[in-house]
Amino acid sequence: MSDRAVLVTGAAGFIGFHVARQLLAQGRPVVGLDIVNDYYDPKLKEARIEILKRDSNFTFERLDLADRAAMKSFFAQHRFPTVIHLAAQAGVRYSLENPHAYVDANIEGFINVLEGCRHNDCGHLLFASSSSVYGSNTKLPFSVQDSVDHPISLYAASKKANELIAHAYSHLYRIPATGLRFFTVYGPWGRPDMAMFLFAKAIVNGEPIKLFNHGEMRRDFTYVDDVSEAIVRLADRPPTGNPEWSGQDPDPATSSAPWKIYNIGNNRPEELLHVVSLLEKEFDCTARKEMLPMQPGDVPATYADIDDLFRDIGFRPATKIEHGIAQFAKWYREYHNFNGRAR
């Protein structure tokens, strides 16, 4: 990786914050970009940014991905050798309420990032996709070799679109691009709209935990330090194209263009009820459970096949759910100044 700064978009976000910290810990200069919107509590995002600013190798830019002129100027100024694009409008259920937010950030914003890479000699673009792209697929574990043509939420469709648009740019302009399909990332500084945080908040406040599909849900919970380690390793391995790729029998995960897709998961799905029981232990309280039907756009199980990740960078996530939840709970107590038994 060049001595020039790495761009991390979404640096105020959960995964972006941890990736930026890992790069900085390796002595790499980082420019973090984020609009710091109010999809969830901006105070949490600002706190992450303040931590990153303690490192003199970190520079922060508050910028809207959808602002075409500003993004063009920003990329021309820095000419990043590596771009780790993690900014997006996240959330499956929110996409039912505010679809235009997904078009603005995940489609228009993504095009602006790709154009910035195209015109400024970017050597490698890594971009966030999602396990949501597997949609109606029921064959487990989910493999990058599987077809993903049946998304069941706008969020998932926008991420599938990112993969396709990135491929077109890789084919046309030879931009090395790596798509990262994340599977239920959790850990310290996590997102308040995700299961782990929602469960902890409910337990601490004595409120009912909403368990969809009547609690019969399994998720491939992946600890954030494992995720950031995989991303930083992949950043140094831009794809060069698969010489064996054939249009007669196309591999969905690779291409003759310098483009590749990876699952970033734990390869070990956990029952949500087991996750709740571990949180109950950490917070010393029995959760109130509210069993609800399946929500539109949701899936009963996620489970990642990560053989490609191990083959290419020798990496498998190593954090057990018990340790990861203990670390998350420790951070949660400290961040919220919670010292006693849950109410």
Image (tube, rainbow, N blue to C red):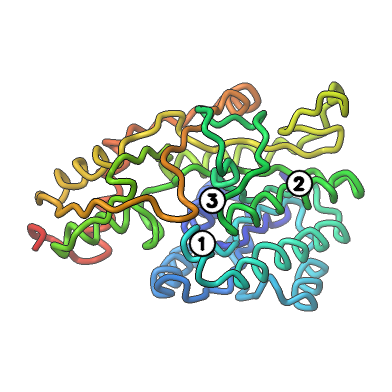
Q: Is residue 60 visible?
A: no
Distance between the alpha carbons at the discs numbered 1 and 2: 24 Å
Residue type, mark 1 in image = Asp
**Residue, far right:** 172
Which callout, 1 or 3, points to the residue nearer the camera?
A: 3
Residue in the image at 50% along x and 62% along y = 13
Q: Is residue 139 above or below residue 132?
A: above
Residue 311, given in percent of the width and then of the height, sits at: 62, 21
Residue in the image at 68% along x and 47% along y = 126
Residue type, mark 3 in image = Val
**Which is more N-terminal, label 2 or label 1?**
1
Residue 217, given in percent of the width and then of the height, sits at: 35, 41
Residue type, mark 2 in image = His
- Please give the residue where the numbered disc 2 appears in the rendered image: 124
Observer-nearest residue: 166 or 101?
Answer: 101
Residue 207 relative to residue 10: left or right: left
Q: Is residue 42 above or below residue 211?
A: below
Residue 33 relative to residue 173: left or right: left
Residue 146 relative to residue 43: left or right: right
**Which is more N-terminal, label 2 or label 3?**
3
Question: Pointer 3 and pointer 2: residues touching (CB < 8 Å)?
Answer: no
Observer-nearest residue: 53 or 115?
Answer: 115
Q: Which mark is residue 55?
A: 1
* Element under disc 3: helix
Q: Is residue 163 visible?
A: yes
Q: Residues within 10 Å of mark 2 (few under 14, many from 20)?
A: many
- Please give the residue where the numbered disc 3 appears in the rendered image: 19
